[in-house]
Image (spheres, rainbow, N blue to C red):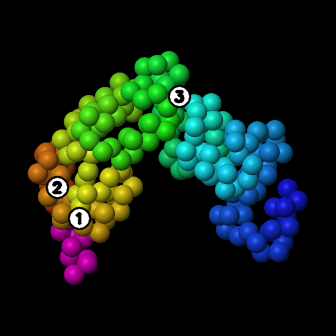
Amino acid sequence: EECVAYGKSHGFFNGDQLAQAEKVAAALKGGAKLPQGCTDQLSCRETCQNPTSLDQAKSCFAFAKAAGLLPPGFDEAQAEKVFSAIQGGTAPFSSMKDFQQCEHPSDAATIKKCTDFAVQSGMMTQGEADALQQTGGKGPGGCQGKDECEQYCADHPDECFQFAQAHNLVRPEQQQHMQAAAAQLKQALD
């Protein structure tokens, strides 16, 4: 608390940095425990981005939850499902580190493992899984992951629409709406 107050009063912290520091200080004051292997900001970031054990991953999750540092839209229920599946031996991977393969799968077998688990756990529909398997886990322009592909498609709407059509990712009732939206966006940019 003293360090955060000092940093705030001397301009060392501002904006998001200050907000995060205040959240961490409040969580610690409230009795939250730092994640295992975490001693400062740098070690906490490294520890929680690359947990070496399930217990370490759980401790990072618990602290982030207590401090209000979970990213917007983070699905706590999905995280709990992954933890339970690893602990129960029903997950396609035996550690959180191995699960990171699902972020950027390197081959069709990994995509299948990840999507099968996501469907079984209720994190994804079978249609979404089929689309990921069909496209090799990559979207238009080679983007991977929801955030990266949304950003790419904001800049390349025509290409994304063509990609969706080519891979049967657009339902007929969506096609007309998407074409109109793409035409409006293109007209606004021209």
Q: Quadrant of the C terminus?
A: bottom left
Query: 151 and 46: which one is in front?
Result: 46
User: In the structure shown, which secondary structural element does the residue marked by tag 2 occupy?
Assistant: helix
The amino acid on which the numbered mark 3 sits, given as a three-letter code, is: Phe
Mark earlier in primary sequence (3, 2):
3
Residue 146 vertical position relative to residue 3 in the rendered view, above or below: above
Q: Which mark is residue 163?
A: 2
Q: Amino acid at mark 1?
A: Pro
Asked if the residue at tag 3 contacts the one at tag 1, i.e. Cβ–Cβ closer than 8 Å, the answer is no
Name the secondary structure under disc 3.
Answer: helix
Residue drawn at the location 68% of the way across and 64% of the way down: 17
- Residue on which disc 3 sits: 83
The quarter holding residue 180 reads bottom left
* Left or right of residue 15, residue 10 in this image: right
Characterize the local packing of mark 3: few (<14), some (14-19) or many (20 or more) Cα atoms within 10 angstroms: some
Please provide the residue range marked out in magenta. Answer: 181-190
Label 1 sits on residue: 157
Query: Where residue 22 appears, x then y in whole percent?
Result: 76, 56
Spatial CA span between label 1 and label 3: 37 Å
